[in-house]
Image (cartoon, rainbow, N blue to C red):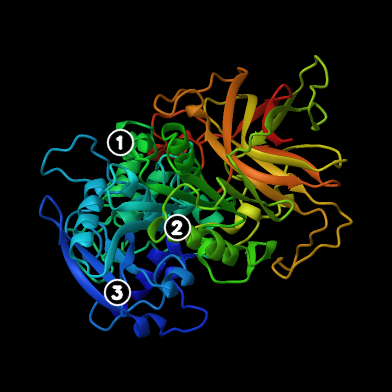
Amino acid sequence: MKKNILLTILSIFFLTSCDSKIEKTQNNDTYVTDNYTKKEVDIVMRDGIKLHTTIYLPKDKNKKYPILMQRTPYSSAPYGNGEMKTKISPNIHLMKEGNIVVYQDVRGRWMSEGVYDNMRAYIPNKTANESDEVSDTYDTIDWLVKNVDNNNGNVGTWGISYPGHYATVSTIDAHPALKAASPQACIGDFFFDDFHHNGAFLLSYFRAISLFGTYKDTPTDSAWYSFPKMNSQDQYQFFLDKGPLKNLNTYFQYDKLDISVAANKDKIDDFFWKEIVEHPNYDSVWKSKGIIQHMDKVPSTVATMIVGGFFDAEDLYGPLETYKGIEKNGKENYNTLVFGPWDHGKWAKNTVENSVGNYYFGDSISLKFQKEIETKFFNHFLKGKGDKNSGLPEAYVFDSGKKEWKSYNSWPPNNVVKENWFLNKDQGLAKHHDGKLIRDIKFISDIKRPVPYSEDIKTVFTPRKYMTDDQRFAARRPDVLVFETAALTNDFTLAGDILAKLKVATTGSAADWIVKVIDVHPSDTEENNDKLQDHLKMSNYHLMVRSEVLRGRFRNSFEFPEPFIPNKKTNVNIKLQDVFHTFKKGHKLQIQVQSTWFPLIDLNPQTYVDNIYKAEETDFKTQTHTVFTDSSIIFSVLK
């Protein structure tokens, strides 16, 4: 098993590297072994499949405890007698207060039986022997409350990223014992989270594909997958040299465990990569796997606290849409939202300093959340009265511009209004259009020189830092259009989603469109921090507050793509996920528009083909794109 430890760590890193479950506690690495006993059991599901489950039981038997459970595809290791985690439960406060803590390998992963299915579809009306993740969760909770000593009959679920998805799953058709759930950075729909953004493929995640798509049908405590080897430290050049996506098929052939490149370029053994390649549109396969479509099935008996990070590169869509889905369908539900200035899962870290990439947001932000919000939530619903008077706000959100927490009784706040700002002909950004004359601004989108998403020269397993990167490198390229206000005379706060209503044209028949919202800091600022890369200063720093891509073929429907008519003015609307950010007096608000973002997303051929995953080298063409100045951005403005 030891020879596989690196693979295991990398797999956990993909979506849960910031999850403090894999870190040591601040004070005592032996706390768990000193205060808990561990028991491993295989719980039989209704269809006979056994799921491996690890139970940490407080040694103090003088009182009853609630059960806190996490279901995970990333392993409930360490396995075996005497082998214990050094950190259990959502945070050290809940660990030291005493709770029964349970980890389970989901179906088909690690020591559990069965065959894994990525985002396994929910079956609304199951027959007696049918199973899905909802029934697996229900059957597990049912067994735990009936068979684990000293439990008080109340169960809570939590998890970050994929485990966060399983926490969401637990709330659907929930077991009566489930009283509280905290889906955190939870995947909501795989066509909009992680590997896809509005139909564009997140090329930067390609090495993680095998983690989810390598076939296994027997329990194992060792990694059964391997990650493709790039043999390069320059991911931009690596993917540019590889060319069309179909050339990556060779990395997903499993004739050998090391995923050596084979001769048959069209052969695909990885079932996840095959699923992506064969389903380029938002068809019934992807729709069936989405969980946010079922938020009407969350009973009012389950309290939910949805947690996310405003700078989470992986799962920003999921937690926001999960919260909104429960709000829409569960008027009687206790449902709250916590969003801070975090990247993926950083709220679970025990560090004092809170930074994302180059940008410093303050101290003790995560620690405050763990102690004052997360712990209070679980204690109230699992040990306390369990009523709606929890003492917590409906929305606890961090203003990433003012760098301070705010509480609201709804999200977005009630005092938010929509404002329409125009991309003006002088490449200014203003609340009013600058006249009847509509200008067309052209740029060349060269497929040999796509706009990079970061100026860093490196390879990363999954990109995160870019979410707060300085965007000056992009603003100074001719294929990135910049629209900017003058220095603001008053603070200007955005709270909620953003809609870019672009009017565009292209000489080709296909194109991607990327919109970025930038906070341009004053040149005379004295602010700096030790997280800045050596070549940067905060003077004139272009902080990316929000960004998003739309694959242009999906501008009218994600299910039924369509080409552009060359040179025809066309509407392209792009929804950008929620922000809570104050552009302070003296700063500038900037919009950047571009058509490549490489290799964060794959390269669009800019010639329409039915399936980009099967495009040929000859399909890729340099084109000239146009943005018209009656394009606008609809902001959610806090008044």
Q: CA distance from mark 3 to mark 2?
A: 21 Å
Amino acid residing under circle 3: Leu
Tell me, for residue 288, which label it has, or none: 1
Q: CA distance from mark 1 to mark 3?
A: 37 Å
Percent position (x, y) of residue 543?
A: 71, 51
Q: Relative to residue 556, is residue 4 depicted above or below?
A: below
* Residue mark closest to the camera, 1 vs 2: 2
Element carrying mark 2: helix
Tell me, for residue 57, which label it has, or none: 3
Q: Residue at x 67, y 47 (%)?
A: 545
Q: Earlier in the sequence, mark 3 or mark 2?
A: 3
Left or right of 437, for residue 403: left
Q: Quadrant of residue 162?
A: bottom left
Q: Quick one: quadrant of the C terminus?
A: top right
Closest to the observer, 379 or 165: 379
| Marks 1,3: beta carbons within 8 A | no
Q: Earlier in the sequence, mark 1 or mark 3?
A: 3
| Marks 3,2: beta carbons within 8 A | no
Q: Relative to residue 239, is residue 439 depicted above or below?
A: above
- What residue sits right under mark 2 in the picture? 380
Left or right of 39, for residue 191: right
Closest to the observer, 506 or 488: 488
Amino acid residing under circle 2: His
Left or right of 482, for residue 320: left
* Residue mark closest to the camera, 3 vs 2: 2
Amino acid residing under circle 1: Ser
